[in-house]
Amino acid sequence: MAVSVDPPAVTRQHLAKTGWTYTFLADPEARVIHRYDLQHDVGGGKVISRPAEFLIDPTGTVRWVDLTEDLRVRTRPETVLGIFDRLSG
């Protein structure tokens, strides 16, 4: 799942363009982004989320977090799956 500050209509357009099929949630007031301390001020009063990956268990406990300041750097899927296997094993 992903969270974006974009309104739902913009998110739908983005998903149609990229072909991504996972769930995107709209957070136009940046509440989730602020709660998890992910805000990145891009100027002019606009806030976006910095890249982050979370593994959250069924009780809502954050079990793993990866944060980066570089928009080009993301955790590889195989890394996340390996961490998931270790946490759930």
Image (cartoon, rainbow, N blue to C red):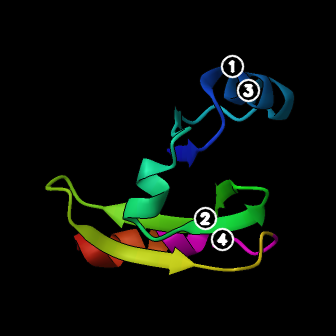
Name the quadrant containing residue 67.
Answer: bottom right
Residue 49 rendering spot, x and y as whole percentages: 62, 60
Label 1: few (<14), some (14–19) or many (≥20) C-alpha neighbours in 10 Å: few
Q: Which residues are magenta?
A: 72-80
Helix, strand or loop for disc 4: loop
Q: Earlier in the sequence, mark 3 or mark 2?
A: 3
Left-right relation of 7 to 86: right
Q: Which residue is mark 4?
A: 76
What is the CA distance from the residue labelled 4 to the residue labelled 1?
Answer: 28 Å
Circles 3 and 1: CB distance less than 8 Å? yes
Q: Which residue is mark 3?
A: 10
What is the CA distance from the residue labelled 3 to the residue labelled 1?
Answer: 4 Å
Mark closer to the observer (2, 1):
1
Q: Name which residue type carries label 1.
A: Ala
Label 3: few (<14), some (14–19) or many (≥20) C-alpha neighbours in 10 Å: few
Q: Which residue is mark 1?
A: 9
Q: Residue at x 63, y 73 (%)?
A: 75
Helix, strand or loop for disc 3: helix
Q: Which residue is mark 2?
A: 77
What is the CA distance from the residue labelled 2 to the residue labelled 4?
Answer: 4 Å
